[in-house]
Image (cartoon, rainbow, N blue to C red):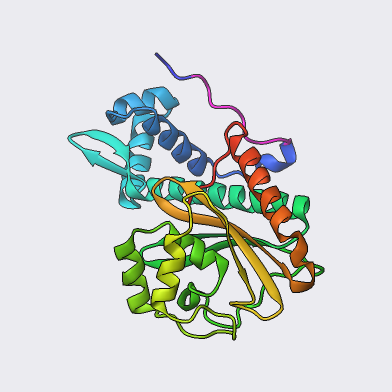
Amino acid sequence: MPAAPHPAVSGAPSQAGTLIGSVQRALRLLERVAEHEQGAPAKQLARETGLALPTAYHLLRTLVHEGYLRRDRGLFFLGEAAGRLGGSGAEQKRRGTVAEVLARCHDAIGVPVYYAVYQDGEIEMLGVSDNSENPAVAEGADFRETGHAHAIGQCLLAQLDEQARRDHLERYPVRPVTPYTVRDNQALLRRLERIGPREPVTERQEYALGTVCAAIPVTVGTIAATMAISMPCDQADRLESAVQQLQSEVGRLLRSPGRSISI
């Protein structure tokens, strides 16, 4: 069936001269190839896009050369370069979703909010929402190496199995960060064993003097993940209620249609 004419791109006559026709035609070809999971020959693509066959051949060869298409037995398929474009868009969308969830939780609770995961044997901070009135905790000691000291790290380690915890501590053994830091590996392992699967983790001045923190586990497929909050010690009396509010906000946001946190 012949393709419908491609919608006009120019919005005003004065802008029409700035459009590059060959780019438009190449994009039309890409769109058509994407619609054919089993591939399509040049003649069919030329017919569907309304292009002359020589023009379609020229553009298709160029797109294959640049990696946006691949040719197999006379059929054209999307190439790796086109896949990377889609991956980049998905990554931007994921980051936008995480930032939005963090910002909403920060606005609702009025404290810095953090999002982190345990991936490839490392603690990775993927997002923070704060402001000048309620700044995030400064990284006084390397964040990855001191998971034993902060609530984020303890919450992530609590979600791992025992062997994974021990493997982590072999690479990053317990060491003092403040006078309140857990004493040694065994003391930390005992503490982690007592943490329930959905239980929040709190720490008081173990990573940063004058600061209390709490973290809650977040389900992200098979990845250990957490969202956390921090506040000055003089506000410690509201830590428990703030954690409950964080749990409520995260649950509400993630239950919203089309909403999820991923990495």
Q: Position of residue 153 (x, y in %)?
A: 50, 67
* 125 and 237: which is toward the camera: 237
- Magenta stretch holds residue 9: yes
How would you classify the magenta stretch by its main secondary structure? loop
Q: Estimate the x, y position of residue 88 in percent, counting from the top left.
A: 48, 51
Q: In the figure, 35 relative to 196: above or below? A: above
Magenta highlight range: 4-12
Percent x, y for residue 163? 29, 64
Q: What residue do we see at 42% from left, 29% from top? A: 51
Left or right: 11, with 196 as reference point = right
| Towards the viewer: 159 or 184 | 184
Which residue appears at 31% of the width and 71% of the height? 167
Q: Residue at x 42, y 68 (%)?
A: 190
Quadrant of the rendered image containing residue 70: top left
What x and y, as percent, mark residue 135? 74, 70
Extreme residue toward the top, this view = 1
Quadrant location of the N terminus in the rendered image: top left
Residue sitting nearer the eye, 255 or 48: 255
Drawn side of residue 7 relative to residue 166, left or right? right
User: How many marks are shown on the rendered structure?
Assistant: 0
Q: Which is more toward the observer, 234 or 42?
A: 234
Query: Is any atom of residue 130 visible in this view?
Result: yes
In this view, 178 is above or below 47: below
Question: Does residue 157 show up?
Answer: no
